[in-house]
Amino acid sequence: MSEPTINTGPEGSPTDQHGSSARYAQQPYPGVPQYATVPPAAQYGGPPPLPPLNAGWAAASIIFFWPLAFAAFNHLHSIFPRWAMGDYQGAQYASDRVKTLGKISLGIAIALFALYAVFMIVVLGFLVVDETSGTTGTTSIYNG
């Protein structure tokens, strides 16, 4: 009985019956070029960090001027989905918009409070003037 012979290639590696190299450890599919599987963002240090959520500003918009809270919370809840999909600029825009809407609602609240304070000063001023002039808008039955 003769021993079976093993065909070897140019580098001494075993070959199959067609002369192809039997070692496919480096390339799982022979003949198909292998490309880098690294995503483009990861080549340069990975994706940017998640922008700040600014949830405090969204809560401030509820407290100070609730009509803006709808838009603030809408943008707040779109930050992470946009970032996860790779829309980093859209996520940053949504984060900045939440902060802007919170600041606008705070500014509106301060302006309304200032107008209320001015209104109360004017009303109290008229009351003081009426009392010092002696005319209160009612007639007295005792003119004594």
Image (cartoon, grey):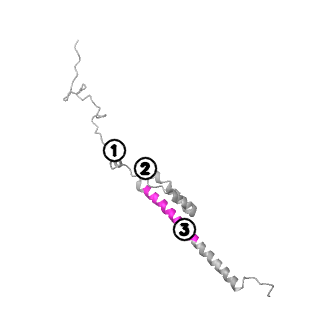
SS under mark 2: helix
- Nearest to N terminus: mark 3 or mark 2: 2
Packing grade of label 1 (10 A; few <14, some 14-19, many >=20) is: few
Magenta-drawn stretch, dominant element (helix, strand or loop): helix
Q: Report whether residue 65 is seen.
A: no
- Identify the residue shown where x is 34% and y is 44%: 38
Residue on which disc 3 sits: 108
In the picture, the disc for residue 85 is 2
Image x and y of residue 11, in percent? 19, 29
In this rendered view, identify the residue nearer to me: 29 or 96: 96
Determine whether 81 is above or below 123 in the image: above
Q: Nearer the viewer, mark 1 or mark 3?
A: 3
Q: Which residues are magenta?
A: 90-113
SS under mark 1: loop
Image x and y of residue 46, in percent? 36, 49
Q: Which amino acid, by three-letter code, is at mark 2?
A: Met
Q: Which amino acid, by three-letter code, is at mark 3?
A: Ile
Image x and y of residue 56, in percent? 52, 58
Packing grade of label 3 (10 A; few <14, some 14-19, many >=20) is: some
Is residue 7 left or right of 119 when viewed as pictured? left
Residue on which disc 1 sits: 38
SS under mark 3: helix
| Label 1, label 3: how far apart the Cα atoms are | 49 Å
| Label 3, label 2: how far apart the Cα atoms are | 34 Å
Packing grade of label 2 (10 A; few <14, some 14-19, many >=20) is: few
- Identify the residue shown where x is 47% and y is 60%: 97
Determine whether 2 is above or below 79 in the image: above
| Label 1, label 2: how far apart the Cα atoms are | 17 Å
- Nearest to N terminus: mark 1 or mark 2: 1
Residue located farthest toward the bottom when viewing the structure as drawn: 144
Determine whether 32 is above or below 54 in the image: above
Do the CB atoms of the residues marked 1 and 2 lie less than 8 Å apart? no
